[in-house]
Amino acid sequence: MARIDDISEYLIAPDPGAPRLTRAVTGTDQNGQPMNLNVVEERPLTIFLNSQEIVTAMTIGDYPQYLALGFLRNQGMLRDGEVIKGVDYDEELEVVVVRTDGQTTYEDKLKKKTRTSGCAVGTVFGDMMEGLEGVVLPEIQVRTSDLYALAAKINRTPSLYLEAGAIHGTILCQGNRPLVYMEDVGRHNAVDKIAGWMLSEGVSAADKILYTTGRLTSEMVIKTALMGIPVLASRSGFTAWGVEIANQVGLTLIGRMKGQRFVCLAGENRLLRDADPALVADEPRKSGRKGSDA
């Protein structure tokens, strides 16, 4: 699948050539021949909320401030209306400190952790379903023509995945336009970066679509719903609990998006089928990008 050169639609696009994201290593192939390969870097990032150490996450290291803000927001440690005084990053110590105007209550959440099914071992603090009871997502109509256009653009965008693999991508979209494309070794990190950018920039979630290359698990559905985004789409498949929660909160859930094909398991009534799949360019079986179930 040919890559696109024009990434001007994006507000933030991947920069696969950025320093510190990959490292060149040497090895041998199946025939014993020497080869050079770029592999993704992993590094720890410790997140503090005021004076309290919250978590150390393994990440590729880009956009650490957005990752910290989004993580804390998605864990319910930063509430709506919270005044954020500053976000300080020390590259040498690999630490981000988020400072708020008032006292924060995180002690109870720190006592209870849930290891998630996400790659790179995600962690959720507190009750995973906490906060969903009051979530009411906008019932926006989703045009299938927009879904096909997004998939075509995103899958051809130069990215760290296409450069080195072993990584997930999450993209915030509006209509048929991809806006912010984040990547990381864990899809939960990529989503948190999106959440942090939205919080930092004051961006509304009501008319947005979240696209991911990873599985549509309960964690992904919960994060998307708590962010207020009404549509979640992926190249990959679903988990049963993810589908159940999506139906519960009114999230439109679309997976297995490859070429002409997709499956909608929640929110079918909100789909506007305005594109004939037969007229959409199908994806070759040996595509440069595959749905990731890792």
Image (cartoon, rainbow, N blue to C red):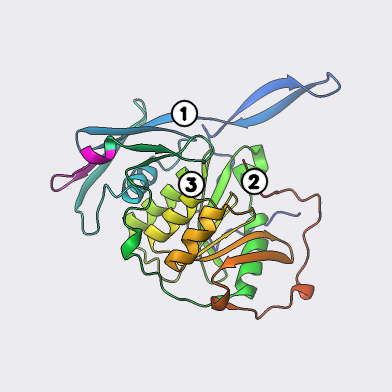
Residue 190's mark?
3
Residue lying at 63% horizontally and 74% vertically, measured from the top left? 144
Residue at image mark 2: 292
The one nearer the camera, 115 or 195, is 115
Distance from label 3 to label 2 (Cα)?
14 Å
Which residue type carries mark 3?
A: Ala
Which residue type carries mark 1?
A: Arg
Q: Residues within 10 Å of mark 1 (few under 14, many from 20)?
A: few
Q: Residues within 10 Å of mark 2 (few under 14, many from 20)?
A: some
Q: Earlier in the sequence, mark 1 or mark 2?
A: 1
Position in image of residue 215 (x %, y %) = 58, 50
Position in image of residue 123 (x %, y %) = 41, 38
| Most distant residue in the left direction | 102
Q: Is residue 13 visible?
A: no
Residue at image mark 1: 43
Q: Which stretch appears magenta?
A: 98-109
Q: Is residue 75 visible?
A: yes
Which residue type carries mark 2?
A: Ser
